[in-house]
Image (tube, grey):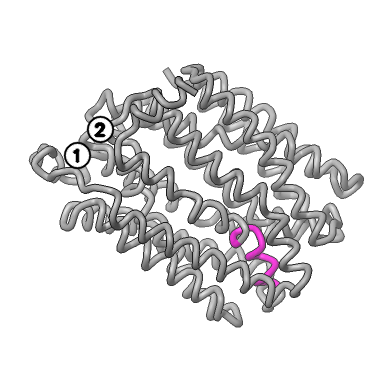
Amino acid sequence: MIKIKEKWNKLSNNTKWLLITEPGWSLPMPWVFYYQPLYMKVLGVSEIGLGLLTSFGMGMSIILPFVGDYFGEKIGKKWAFIILDLICNIGYLLSLFFARDIIAFLLTYLFSALYSAIGPLWETLLVEEIDDESRTITYSTISLINLFGSLSTPIAGIIIQFYGILKGFRYVILIAFILFIIKTLVLVFKIKERPVHQYKKDIFRRRLSDVTKIIVSNYSVLLLFTITIVMNITMYSIPTYLALYLKDDKGAGLSVEEISLVPMFSSITSILVLSLIIFRTSTRYRRYLLISFLLSVIAYTLYYFSFMYSMFAYFASIISGIKTIEFIVSRTMLNNYIDRINPEYRSKILSVLYSIVQIVTIPAPTLLGLAYTYDPKNIWVVGIILSIIELFALIKIE
């Protein structure tokens, strides 16, 4: 307990309050994200339509990170984050609640695109003014909170099973809406703006091209960008089709209640792994990623063959739980490299990263949707190939 208290005291004020309030978003939102594809399908959206909408959202996300960075310079990161966060989440949840067809879902994905504007601001507020060890613990704690959200997905499954997909999912949306509002009210009063005079204005306002040159000239940062891009597909685009695959008769063929167990099993593994990272902080980042990429190949293989034996899906979910560390470890490594370059560039470098990720991954959901339509098992073949690419990029990092 003494060590935990010492680690907590080393965190900045903003880091502490962002961690304290994180459950207001990270507990209910995994429920929304996980069951959204089923909700959309009931309302007539096909797998290809789902992919097109996701690609549309990614397309809108290309320039939005720089919008967040711009407002961060003008009104400060605190208020830029809070205002954009309100617009994004309230708009997303309400438009999703009232959507009735694929056209109406365009608005939902437009609001969800704002997450790319919020991300760099949120990460900067979260990790600035803390050391490397605290940074690792912070990202691990955020992921741990997210995992409890996934672990509690069966609660949403029960609600949806009891009330039906349409009505039940809208109750889930309302729960998320209420918790988000509470979280935001606390942050308004508790997080603080870093005084502007602390920034080196001549560096802070440099052109984006200068920041891009710095990124391009750093080989290890480029490789970490590559891993982040591929990871975005394996951790976010492919899982878009997970619930559909698990329920699909050509896939695992599970019921709504049974598929809710998959994220729960995955979360249990992730919680165990993250607990080790938090309480036994280590800098063996490369080893963590190597193990995760190798196990991902095994997990995707098991998902592929779950059409023959549905229990393979549960084994795959248990193994794939380790993937949670990929974001934590790669982000910690990237932030450490940014410290070597110049920490004042953090917000802009993260903004560039968010935009590049969106540009490269725009076609991914649509292509995955086409691959799924041809044969649902194809998405796992893609996952195996991408994990191998991640391995090669990791080996090359200096």
Numbered disc 2: secondary structure? helix
Q: Is residue 81 depicted above or below 18 in this figure?
A: below
Q: Is residue 33 left or right of residue 396?
A: right
Q: Is residue 336 magenta?
A: no
Numbered disc 1: secondary structure? helix
Q: Is residue 394 left or right of residue 315?
A: left
Q: Where does the image place residue 8, in percent across and percent down from the top left?
A: 40, 30
Q: Which amino acid type is marked by label 2?
A: Ile
Q: Quadrant of the C terminus?
A: top left
Residue 395 visible from this viewpoint: no
Q: In this figure, which residue is indicated by the disc labeled 2?
A: 214
Q: In percent of the image, x 61 and y 35: which residue is there? A: 323
Circle 1 Cα neighbour tier, 10 Å, few/some/many (<14 / 14–19 / ≥20): few
Q: In percent of the image, x 43 and y 64: which residue is there? A: 181
- Which residues fall within the magenta stretch? 32-41
Circle 2 Cα neighbour tier, 10 Å, few/some/many (<14 / 14–19 / ≥20): few
Q: In this figure, which residue is indicated by the disc labeled 1?
A: 210
Q: Where does the image place residue 190, in percent across and percent down from the top left?
A: 30, 50
Q: Is residue 29 left or right of residue 261?
A: left
Dominant SS type (magenta): helix
Q: Is residue 339 depicted above or below 354 in this figure?
A: above
Q: In percent of the image, x 60 and y 82: which residue is there? A: 100
**Proximity of marks 2 and 1: CB atoms separated by less than 8 Å:** yes
Q: Which amino acid type is marked by label 1?
A: Asp
Of 189 and 269, nearer the camera is: 189
Q: Quadrant of residue 207?
A: top left
Residue 293 visible from this viewpoint: yes
Q: Where does the image place residue 288, in percent across and percent down from the top left?
A: 57, 23
Q: CA distance from mark 2 to mark 1?
A: 6 Å
Of 250 and 270, nearer the camera is: 270
Q: Which mark is residue 396?
A: none
